[in-house]
Amino acid sequence: MSDTTQVVAQPQNEVVQREDDKKARTVTLLPPVDIIEDDSGVTLWADLPGVTRDKLEVSVHDGNLRIEAEAVVPMPTGLRVQHAEVRQPHFARAFSLSPDLDSTKIEANLQDGVLKLTIPRREEARPRRIAISVA
């Protein structure tokens, strides 16, 4: 990333206990991400093991990008769980987007538990070469 950071992770704890209702407690995990910036924009990869497309939500509101997902950990029939620290993990991560990025053109792709977000830079914010004429 350059000195003018394009995507800023909002502070969160690695693992957060939250209470969806009074009966069930859910563990929220902070998925690890890699962020690459170039002249065309930003590419973000988030590791979301066990997440399927129907359990993934990516949203943008007021310059904030939010990723939320529920992992599905299938249990083979005939087996009994002896110990499980995380049965149905919930992933959540939020980022503040720079105004230089065009949030209306974000592309998302989920493959093998890895979410790839491509966030293009606004055309007017892209570097351009200035032609020099000789007088």
Image (spheres, helix red, strand yellow):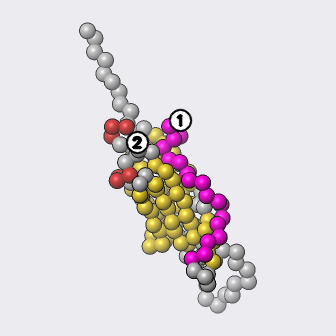
Q: x, y (%) of residue 74?
A: 58, 80
Q: Nearer the viewer, residue 40 or 97?
A: 97
- Cα distance between the residues tagged 2 and 1: 13 Å
Q: Which residue is mark 1?
A: 3
Q: Residue furthest bottom?
A: 78
Q: Is residue 82 left or right of residue 26?
A: right
Residue at left offset 57%, top offset 70%: 90
Most common SS among magenta residues: loop
Q: x, y (%) of residue 78?
A: 64, 90
Question: In terms of sequence position, does the residue under pointer 2 or pointer 1 come before the other?
Answer: 1
Question: Dot 1 lies on which element?
Answer: loop
Seen in the picture, residue 5 relative to 69 is either above or below; the reply is: above
Question: Dot 2 lies on which element?
Answer: loop
Residue 49 image-quadrant placement: bottom right
Residue at left offset 55%, top offset 51%: 9
- The answer to if 5 sits in the magenta stretch is yes
Q: Is residue 51 left or right of residue 81?
A: left
Residue 25 image-quadrant placement: bottom right
Amino acid tagged 2: Asp
Seen in the picture, residue 67 relative to 10 is either above or below; the reply is: below
Tell me which segment is drawn in magenta.
1-20
Q: Which residue is mark 2?
A: 100
